[in-house]
Image: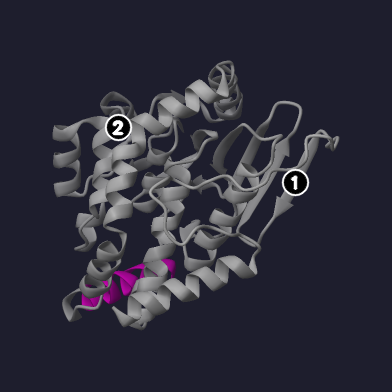
Amino acid sequence: MAAVAAAAGTFARRMARSGVLFPRSSPQVWPQAARQPPGLLPTQRRAFSNNKILVELDTSSGVATMKFKSPPVNSLSLDFLTEFCISLEKLENDRACRGLIITSAIPRVFSSGLDITEMCGKSTEHYAEFWRAVQEMWIRLYGSNLVTVAAINGSSPAGGCLIALSCDYRIMVENPKYVIGLNEAQLGIVAPFWFKDTFVNAVGHRAAERSLQLGLLHSVPEAHRMGLVDEVVPEEKLQEKAVAVMAQWLALPDHARQLTKSMMRKAVLDHMLAHREEDIQNFVKFTSKDSIQKSLSTYMEMLRKKKR
C-alpha cells in the first residue's frame, strides 16, 4: 500500500509540473477544464510537440493529428505515457478541437506496447507509478469526448493494440508484415481485466478469450475479419480514409454522440475506476515476483541479441 500511495503522489506531481490538473477521485470519466475563450481567432493550424509525441490541430476542420515519434518502436515508457496524457488533455480543453487521429511517425510500427524496461529491475514504487500512468492513458482515451480514430500504420502488439482498441474507429494499413493483438500471454504476463473488457467489447467474448489465452498477434486480414480493425486500406490511402471517417462522425451533433459514447463505455470505465488501486497493487505484486522478473530479463536479453 505504501508503494501505491507514494506512486500516486509521484505521478500526480509529474502531471502537475506539466500544467495538467485532474481530480483526485471521481466516478465520472474526466471532466473538461476551462477551454480556450471562443472570442480568440485561431490560426488554421496549431502544432505542439513533446519529445515523444507531435500534435497538429487543424482549426478549420476541428481535427487534430497525434503522431508517435519515440524511436525505435514507440514503446509506452513512463515519459511517453505522461506526454500522451498531457497532449490529450490540451486537445480536450481546446474549443477548436472535436476529433483526434492517432498514428505513428515511425516506419512499420504503430506502437510496440509497454516499455519492458519500466517493469524490470526497478522498485515497487516505480512499478506502481508506471502502472498508474498506463491506467491514466486508457481512462483518458477510452473516455474521451473527442471522436478518436486510430490510423494504424504498422504493427501494434499489446499496449499498442490497447490504444487502438480505445479509439472509436480503427483503420489499418494493408501489409503482410504487420500484426496486431494483445499478446501478453506470450511473455508470461496476464492482460488485466480492463484490457480484456476493452477487447471483448470490440471482438466478442469467444474471439477475445481465444486470442488472449494464446497471446495471438493477428494478421491484418484476420484482424479485419474479427472486428479488431474496422477497415483496411493501402498505406497511401490511410490519411485520406481517416479524414473521411472523421468527417462522417463529426457530421453528427457532438452532444448526442458524446452521451451515446459515455452510455456505451460507462460500465467498463466505472468498473476500472472502482478497482483502480487494487489493480495497481496486483500489478506491483505480480511484476515483483522473481519468476516474472526472470522472464522479463530473458525477453530483454533476447531483444538485445536481435539488435546486434
**Contact, mark 1 vs mark 2 (Cβ under 8 Å):** no
Q: Is mark 1 on a helix, strand or loop?
A: strand
Determine the residue positioned at 58% across, 21% down. 250
> Toward the viewer: 194 or 36?
36
Q: Is mark 2 on a helix, strand or loop?
A: helix
State left or right for residue 49 relative to residue 78: right
Location of the N terminus (image quadrant) = bottom left
> Toward the viewer: 108 or 64?
64
**Residue 277 location (% of width, % of height):** 30, 65
Give the labeled residue for mark 1: 47
The number of numbered discs placed on residues in the rendered structure image is 2
**As shown in the figure, which amino acid type bears the numbered disc 2?**
Ala
**Residue 305 location (% of width, % of height):** 37, 72
Give the labeled residue for mark 2: 202
**Residue 91 location (% of width, % of height):** 64, 44
Dot 1: within a 10 Å radius of its alpha carbon, few (fewer than 14), some, or many (20 or more) residues?
few
Determine the residue positioned at 54% across, 62% down. 82
Q: What colour scheme governs how the chains and residues are painted in the rendered image of this protein?
A: one colour
Taking the magenta stretch, the answer to whether it contains residue 282 is: no
> Toward the viewer: 242 or 82?
82
Taking the magenta stretch, the answer to whether it contains residue 302 is: yes
Location of the C terminus (image quadrant) = bottom left
Whether 236 is drawn above or below 118: the answer is: above
The magenta stretch is 293-308
Determine the residue positioned at 32% across, 32% down. 228
Q: Distance between the residues labelled 1 and 2?
A: 32 Å
**As shown in the figure, which amino acid type bears the numbered disc 1?**
Ala
